[in-house]
Image: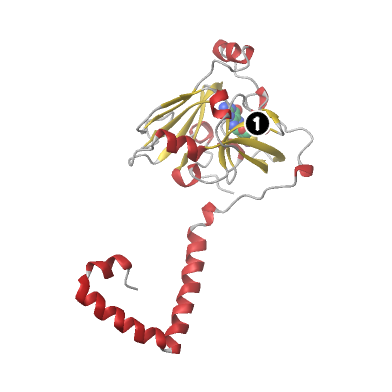
Amino acid sequence: MISRRALVGMGATAGGLLLSGCDKLTASPTFREALRGGEALTMRAQRLLTDRGALAPEFDPAQRSPVFRANGTRRPASPEYAAHAASNFADGRLKVDGLVARPLSLSRAQIGTMPARTQPTRHDCVEGWSAIGQWTGVPLKLLLDQAGLRRDARYIVFHCADNYGPGRYYESIDLIDAFHPQTIVAWGLNGRLLPVENGAPLRLRVERMLGYKHAKYVERIEAVASLATIGGGRGGYWEDSSDYEWYAGI
Ligand SMILES: Nc1nc2c(c(=O)[nH]1)N[C@H]1C(S)=C(S)[C@@H](COP(=O)(O)O)O[C@H]1N2
Ligand SMILES: [Mo]
């Protein structure tokens, strides 16, 4: 098919000729049917291509797990984190930096005033358990738009406050997941502020991904062009240390 751009590029005379030609073609029933078939095909192809944008199932609040179990770090061990927790995270700041036009430094209170999304979703951990929790947070897209993502940014890295084993916990996702409508920086769980064991003050929810991608205790969000120089270079703590897949889509 000739794209609109190509048509525009053909100039007025040729364009006019083409258009009158098109008028005749669309009048013929067989051509109209062929067009309709093409539309169905395009729609199917588009669904396949946009599958990664599909929403994860959202559940009835009554289906929530009575207790949302905690896994991995349950409380970061650093004195800095202890001090933040003692002041109810009032002084902590979330940094959004890297390949952005306007680096951000936001308190949890500021983030709490931004538009929020609430989503009751199921968390699936590779260790073989699942839980349904209702998360509330700011869509990551809003933070990235406010910071002004540069054109060379390709991945978003989440730097965490905890050391798990030898190194800092971190995770990363590509821009498709970063802009997914259910990708939020969550500050609430089941109608309350996020508890420490589930990642207070802020944790990532990236609902089309396995549990280990959902970074807890996020203190810095960095836009990068490549993951090679971050941590061990494989895009996440478990990816570096245990060969977990970087792309953990579900
Ligand atoms: N910073 C940090 N984020 C983390 C982890 C961790 O140990 N540290 N564990 C991951 C794993 S394996 C899972 S299953 C979930 C657990 O989240 P929860 O503690 O709220 O259940 O957090 C993920 N994010
Ligand atoms: Mo997990």
Q: Which amino acid does the dot numbered 1 rest on? A: Gly
- Please state the horizontal and vertical placement of residue 229, each as a whole percent of the image: 37, 31
- Please state the horizontal and vertical placement of residue 9, each as a whole percent of the image: 23, 67
Q: Residue tagged by mark 1?
A: 188
Residue at x-position 72% and y-position 34%? 190
Relative height, residue 99 to residue 41 (above, below): above
**Colour style of the rendered protein structure:** secondary structure
Query: 195 left or right of 172?
Result: right
- Please state the horizontal and vertical placement of residue 30, each as a whole percent of the image: 44, 88
- In the rendered image, the quadrant that contains the N terminus is bottom left
Q: Which residue is nearer to you in this view: 46 or 90?
A: 90
Q: Which residue is nearer to you in this view: 96 or 233?
A: 96
Query: 50 left or right of 230?
Result: right
Q: Residues within 10 Å of mark 1 (few under 14, many from 20)?
A: many
- Please state the horizontal and vertical placement of residue 124, each as a whole percent of the image: 66, 42
Q: Secondary structure at mark 1?
A: strand
Relative height, residue 5 to residue 217 (above, below): below
Residue 46 visible in the shown view: yes
